[in-house]
Image: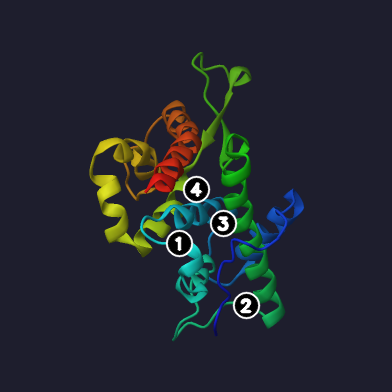
Amino acid sequence: MRHPQYNPASDNRPLSDDELNDLDELLAALPTDGALNIEALDGYLAGLLLTPGRALADLPGDAWLPVVWGGDGEPDPAPFASGKQRKKVIMLVLRHLHSIATAWQQRPQGWEPIFSFADGDSETGDADDAVEYADAEDWAAGFLIAVDLAPEAWAPLFDGGETAALLAPIAALGAEDGPLAQASAAERDEASRSIPDAMLALRAMRLKT
């Protein structure tokens, strides 16, 4: 089945919080282990938009959309109960993708990625003093899935220089057995909170090329 391409000129409105929750629940309910959750999807879409050397609008939807639900190739067909359900998921994904691109273009400093937040141990060890920590592990893992679709394009950015420093928290959090896999909540929080500015810096660099 052919999937629609991303159209940056579309007038799709951003997803509401309820629609984001609906999309997360739809993906979680699919009978597959490969579907992304909403955090991983957010990171995946950001990675697609930032992939060097190509415009996402030029990439066929077949090349990236099935990754969202774990694929629909043989021998494993797409895990949707109906064509209506598939269409709903695709349209929600495209709208969210458009909202990220629009936020980066119109109000970049107001853009917020979708991260998990959890209560971590306080420095005093007192449960009443627990601090909320950001944890972008799933988001970073989704971003790295986009990287894996174009490894040769991304390799120079990970290999050294300013871009490698910007991408380091993503690799540390999202890679399997990455250096922050067993890190403290505070260390994961620090790495996670560095990601939004890093993404905006990468986008600014891309616009100059």
Closer to the chain start, of discs 4 and 2, is 2
Vertical placement of 15 versus 159: above or below?
Answer: below
Vertical placement of 69 versus 201: above or below?
Answer: below
Q: Residues at badges 3 and 1 in contact (C-beta under 8 Å)?
A: no
**Residue 201 x %, y %:** 43, 38
Three-letter residue code for mark 4: Trp
Q: Which is closer to the viewer, label 1 or label 2?
A: 1
The quarter of the image holding the N terminus is bottom right
Closer to the chain start, of discs 4 and 3, is 3
Q: CA distance from mark 1 to mark 2?
A: 28 Å
Neighbours of disc 4 within 10 Å: few (<14), some (14-19), many (20+): many
The circle drawn on residue 55 is 1
Q: CA distance from mark 4 to mark 2?
A: 24 Å
Where is mark 3, residue-wise?
Answer: 37
Where is mark 4, residue-wise?
Answer: 139
- Specify the quadrant of the image occupied by residue 20: bottom right
Q: Which is closer to the viewer, label 1 or label 4?
A: 1
Closer to the chain start, of discs 3 and 1, is 3
